[in-house]
Image (cartoon, rainbow, N blue to C red):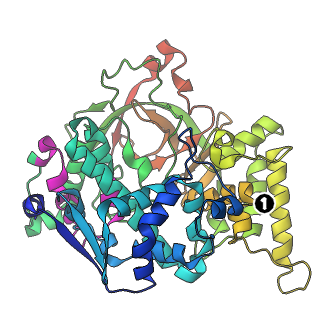
């Protein structure tokens, strides 16, 4: 099929019959996309805008159903499957057909990219979640990410210098898309891989291979690690309890990891000043004499988890529903573990969203006056008071899914709450034996080790295997005090402390 799509002059992609105002969305998507890109300022950045600013630019009001119709296009079934990626990546040209309308590939791509870059458009789905339904919002988000990653993958096949970017996009696609046969999570991307990697992959649908899928899975991921400049599992949810797959392998096909951890400005295992372990700056992998299920990787033990404040009680049913009182209790429980001081408070709030230096982000322009932690607690207490009196004439219950909270008066703290909803599911707050604050995977236990892999970006949490020799990979973390590679400040000491972790 890969050869077939590569030879086609044009591929026509059928999205289905007209529905959910798709005719209107298809007709206006090119103009809508062009106006979104006009929001980009002269310096090349994207800044938060108010509702009035957006309407003044000629864009529809945030409440306009056109936004909902455009987003629903990306929620269609075609965008959820893994095998379809070949159609857009390998074809010379492709056109999307929906009902009697058609959309060019570049329009579909540019809207998806603009949606991810513009603070305004990225919040639009939140305003229409009730009209769309949580499932279709999730599918729409997945579809938009698929198109962005397909574009990255397509570009990498045309430029050899972008091989690593293409490989990362491939793994993101394997993570987010669905396939009915497990081995297809590897085989379906074979024709889009670099030649050297594709040549090592033999397609085998025998019953034995299907029973031992974990071997194919681990073999492919190891080959990816040998080519990457960073440990990529920060992009995936931890592989907790999946049978026949090593703990260090990402669970392909488990759905996009909405709760990814950001990597901007982090050099925990790859300080810019020193990289003596690898001239290429890649991960330091060692050959394994044990089995294909063991990964040997060099790193440094940096700290030990001591106390944990779980975030799981914050959520009930759907993680898309904000329970302000539970968030407030969790914030107070976390702050009880740290000393007072404006600097500590800022760093705590940064750790809690996995984003050290968060106040420097354009997303958080317009910072309120005073201590940020006190300000956030006051904001939550106000919302909690309204929730407690729901149904009373006064005060009026607060609806957070409005332009006022997403785009206008309260957008600073709404932006922070949005990140809580992304970062907290599947994670806990932790204190280490050295007094560091951290956000860690929810399966982390007191006594687990915080380490950095040489060449990696984020600190990782490992747990001792029952055999006392191997380690189980728990997942990536954000740990205040080692994010910028502080463990390498003393050259002689870190070289002496270097060890090989045998991940099983």
x, y (%) of residue 420?
63, 58
Q: Is residue 402 visible?
A: yes
For the residue labelled by badge 1, is the local secondary structure a helix, a strand or a loop? Answer: loop
Q: Magenta-highlighted stretch: main secondary structure?
A: helix
Asked whether 191 falls inside the magenta stretch, the response is: yes
Q: Is residue 1 magenta?
A: no
Task: Tell me what residue is drawn at x 56 percent, y 25 percent.
Answer: 486
Residue beneath the point at 77% across and 61% down: 328
From the top left corner, tell me how far across and down residue 314 is, in percent: 67, 66
Quadrant of res 228? top left
| Quarter of the N terminus within the rendering | bottom left
**Quarter residue 479 falls in:** top right
In this view, the residue in front, 496 or 172, is 172
Residue 473, given in percent of the width and then of the height, sits at 41, 48
User: Which residue, given by chain and number where applicable, does mark 1 sit on?
Assistant: 409
Q: Is residue 451 positioned above or below 68 on the image?
A: above
Indicate whether 317 appears above or below 34.
below
- 243 or 362, which is in the foreground? 362
Percent position (x, y) of residue 331? 75, 55
462 relative position to 84: left or right: right
Q: Is residue 200 visible?
A: no
In the picture, measured across the screen, residue 422 lies left or right of residue 175, that is: right
- In percent of the image, x 65 and y 42: which residue is there? 358
Instruction: Using residue 219 as the reference point, say whether residue 238 is left or right of it.
Output: right
**Nearest the eye: 131 or 284:** 131
**What crowding class fits label 1: few (fewer than 14 Cα within 10 Å), some (14-19), or many (20 or more)?**
few
Against 191, residue 278 (above or below) is above
Q: Which residues are magenta?
A: 171-198
The residue at the point 20 percent across, 49 percent down is: 219
Q: Is residue 492 above or below residue 232?
A: above
Furthest toward the right, the residue is 394
């Amino acid at each position: 099929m890969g050869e077939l799509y590569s030879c086609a002059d044009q591929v026509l992609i059928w999205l289905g019959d007209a529905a959910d105002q798709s005719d209107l969305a298809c007709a206006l998507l090119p103009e809508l996309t062009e106006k979104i890109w006009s929001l980009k300022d002269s310096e090349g950045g994207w800044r938060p805008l108010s509702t009035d600013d957006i309407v003044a630019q000629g864009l529809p009001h945030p409440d306009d159903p056109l936004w909902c119709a455009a987003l629903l296009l990306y929620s269609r079934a075609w965008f959820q499957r893994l095998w379809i990626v070949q159609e857009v990546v390998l074809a010379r040209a492709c056109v999307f057909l929906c009902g009697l309308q058609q959309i060019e590939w570049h329009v579909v791509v540019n809207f998806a990219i603009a949606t991810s870059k513009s603070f305004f458009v990225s919040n639009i789905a939140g305003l229409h979640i009730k009209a769309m339904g949580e499932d279709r919002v999730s599918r729409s988000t997945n579809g938009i990410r698929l198109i962005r990653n397909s574009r990255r993958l397509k570009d990498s096949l045309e430029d050899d210098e972008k091989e690593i970017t293409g490989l990362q996009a491939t793994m993101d696609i394997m993570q987010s898309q669905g396939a009915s046969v497990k081995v297809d999570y590897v085989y379906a991307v074979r024709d889009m891989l670099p030649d050297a990697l594709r040549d090592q992959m033999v397609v085998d649908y025998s019953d034995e291979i299907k029973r031992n899928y974990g071997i194919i899975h681990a073999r492919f991921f190891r080959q990816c690690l040998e080519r990457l400049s960073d440990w990529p599992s920060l992009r995936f949810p931890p592989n907790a309890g999946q049978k026949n797959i090593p703990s260090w392998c990402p669970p392909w096909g488990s759905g996009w990891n909405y709760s990814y951890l950001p990597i901007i400005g982090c050099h925990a295992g790859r300080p810019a000043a020193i990289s003596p372990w690898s001239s290429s700056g890649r991960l330091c992998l060692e050959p394994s004499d044990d089995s294909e299920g063991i990964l040997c990787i060099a790193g440094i033990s940096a700290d030990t988890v001591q106390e944990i404040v779980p975030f799981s009680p914050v959520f009930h049913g759907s993680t898309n529903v904000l329970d302000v009182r539970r968030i407030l209790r969790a914030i107070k429980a976390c702050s009880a573990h740290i000393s007072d001081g404006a600097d500590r408070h800022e760093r705590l709030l940064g750790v809690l969203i996995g984003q050290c230096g968060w106040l420097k982000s354009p997303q958080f322009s317009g910072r309120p006056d005073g201590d940020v932690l006190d300000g956030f607690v006051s904001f939550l207490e106000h919302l909690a008071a309204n929730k407690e009196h729901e149904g009373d004439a006064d005060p009026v219950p607060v609806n957070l899914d409005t332009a006022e909270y997403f785009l206008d008066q309260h957008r600073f703290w709404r932006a922070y709450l949005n990140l809580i909803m992304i970062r907290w599911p599947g994670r806990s707050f932790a204190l280490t034996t050295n007094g560091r604050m951290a956000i860690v995977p929810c399966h982390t236990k007191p006594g687990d080790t915080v380490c950095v892999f040489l060449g990696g970006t984020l600190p990782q949490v490992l747990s001792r295997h029952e055999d006392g020799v191997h380690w189980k990979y728990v997942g990536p973390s954000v740990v205040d005090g080692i994010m910028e590679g502080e463990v390498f400040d003393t050259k002689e000491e870190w070289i002496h402390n270097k060890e090989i972790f045998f991940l099983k």
